Amino acid sequence: MAPLLWSSAAFAQWTLEPASSSLAFTSVKNQTIAEHHSAKQFTASVSDAGALTGSVDLTQLDTNIEVRDERLRTMLFETEQFSSATITGNIDPALLTAKTGSVTTIETTLNLTLHGKTQSLPAKLSVARLDESQLLVSTLTPIMVNAADFALAEGVEKLREVAGLSSIAVSVPVTGVWLFQKD
């Protein structure tokens, strides 16, 4: 009789709805000028066991300045060799079957692989069960990515030099809102 207690959502695969999701980062140049940027292409899914996997296409970052986008690809991320960043983590599977309308704050660790290096990053997320087929995950505080942790400090320096800037911050806050649809 115990199997009757399991809802069909317990066996769901959740897939990202890109049109209703966002992934953004902010850069700071010359110590006071902050600029907002975004990823145009990224994918993610959450398994029925709560395993989160995602990928960001680094060739599709959008800074609203085409020459800067090209410099990010060639001078910083070296996308010919490292075309994407990957993210893995876990969400408590109980949140996937939580009552519709429930919102839970979690503190977790996300593993980011970028430029051939992997680092564990703390993340404070909100997980909201919108209805039987939709799950909304969003950052409550920015996830801080330090370029030096991913062998990118030299690339940041090259960008600073070519742009004629006095500084570019090596620590970048990343935020996101991700809508998942049950398959």
Image: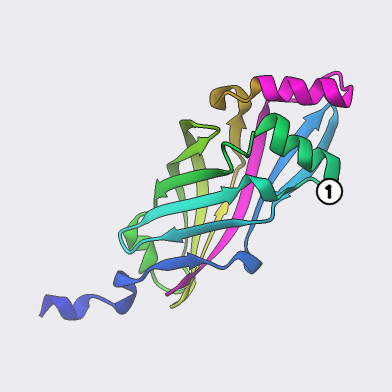
User: In the image, 110: left or right of 82?
Assistant: left
Residue at point 42% right, 53% down? 52
Q: Is residue 170 above or below residue 94?
A: above
Figure quadrant of residue 80: top right
Q: Is any atom of residue 158 visible in this view?
A: yes
Q: Is residue 101 above or below residue 95?
A: below
Q: Residue furthest front?
A: 80
Residue under circle 1? 64
Q: Is any atom of residue 30 visible in this view?
A: no
Q: Residue furthest right?
A: 164
Magenta residue check for 123 = no
Residue 130 in the image: x percent, y percent?
51, 72
Could you tell me the amino acid type at mark 1? Answer: Asn
Location of the N terminus by quadrant is bottom left
Residue 28 in the image: x percent, y percent?
78, 31
User: In the image, 1: left or right of 102?
Assistant: left
Figure quadrant of residue 150: top right
Residue 27 in the image: x percent, y percent?
75, 35
Q: Coloured how?
A: rainbow
Magenta residue check for 169 = yes
Residue at point 62% right, 62% down? 21
User: SS class of the residue under badge 1?
Assistant: loop
Within-10-Å neighbours for mark 1: few <14, some 14–19, many 20+: few
Q: Nearer the viewer, residue 78 or 99?
A: 78
Q: Is residue 47 above or below residue 176?
A: below
Q: Is residue 94 above or below residue 10?
A: above
Location of the C terminus by quadrant is bottom left
Residue 138 in the image: x percent, y percent?
57, 55
Part of the protein shown in magenta: 154-183
Q: Nearer the viewer, residue 104 or 10?
A: 10
Residue at point 41% right, 60% down? 46
Residue at point 33% right, 62% down? 94
